[in-house]
Amino acid sequence: MNIILIGGPSVGKGTYASKLKKIYHIPHISTGDLFRENIKNETELGIKAKTYIDKGNLVPDEVTIDMVKDRLSKEDAQNGYLLDGFPRTTAQAEALESFTKIDKVLYFTADESVIIARVAGRRICKACGAIFHTTNIPPKKEGVCDYCGGEIYQRPDEQPEIVKERLNTFQEKTKPVIDYYKEKGLLAEIDANRDINNPKFRVIEDCQEVLDQLKA
C-alpha cells in the first residue's frame, strides 16, 4: 500500500509513522531525511540540492521529484511506503502519479491550541536528538537527556508565535493538495487532537481502519 501522510507542523506525523511502519512493514520515507541523506552521501541529486540550499534558495521541483522517484524505486519500498513531506503542491502531486500509484492519503488534523500546547512543552537533546516533553515525557533530571546526558533545549521554530505562522503557511500552501486528493476520493481525515498518552487515543486505530480496507 502506497500511503501519503499530510499534516501541519507538530501534528505528530513522525510518531504515527513510526508505529504504522511496524504494523504494515513498510518504510517511512521523509523528504527531510531524503535531502539530508543525499547531501551527506554526496549523491548527484544531493550535490544539486546543496547548491540551491547553500544560496538560501528553494530546491526546484524537478530535483525533489527525482529524489523521491529514486527512493521509491528501492527494494524496500516495492510493497508500499509511508511518504511524508511530499507532495507539497498540486504540480508535485501530478508528477508523483506519473511514476507511482497512490492508494490513500492520511490527513492528520488537530486544533491550533492543541498543537501549540504540545509544542510549547517539547524539548530535544542537542547531542542525540531524543525527544522529551515537560508534561508528557519529562526527563529524569531537568535539562539533561536520560539517554546520553546531553543538553535538552527548545527549538527556536517551536516557539508559540512561530508555530502559529507555520500553521498558517501550511494551511495556505497545502489546501490545494488536500483538495486535489479529496476530489480523487483518496483523502481520509484523521482526528489527531488527543494526546498519544491519553487512554482514549485512537489515531493509530483510526489509521488502521482506513488502511485495512485497502487489503480487503
Image (cartoon, rainbow, N blue to C red):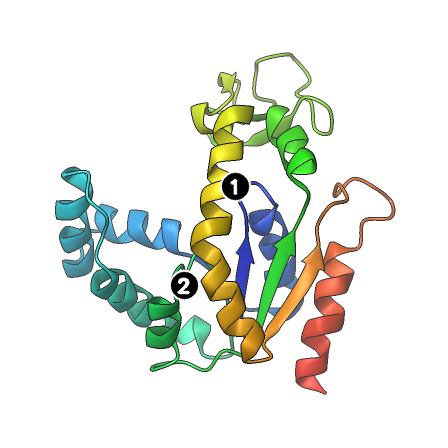
Q: Residue furthest right?
A: 199
Pointer 2 local density, CA inside 10 Å: few below 14, some 14–19, many at least 20? many
Q: Is residue 73 visible?
A: no
Q: Nearer the viewer, mark 2 or mark 1?
A: 1
Query: Residue at (54%, 58%) from the top-left corner?
Result: 6
In this rendering, would 64 be left or right of 184?
Answer: left
Q: Earlier in the sequence, mark 2 or mark 1?
A: 2
Query: Residue at (51%, 21%) from the top-left corner?
Result: 154
Where residue 40 sits in the image (x, y, percent)? 24, 46
Q: Is residue 149 visible?
A: yes
Residue ID for mark 1: 167
Disc 2 marks a residue whose amino acid type is Pro
In this rendering, would 129 be left or right of 204?
Answer: left
**Helix, strand or loop at mark 2:** loop
Task: Evaluate if marks 2 and 1 touch, with contact meaning CB atoms under 8 Å apart.
Answer: no
Work out how far the residue at label 2 is from the one at label 1, CA to CA, in angstroms. 17 Å
Where residue 38 sits in the image (x, y, percent)? 25, 53
Look at the picture and state if 148 lies above or below 48.
above
Quadrant position of the N terminus in the picture: bottom right
Residue ID for mark 2: 87
In this rendering, would 40 be left or right of 2?
Answer: left
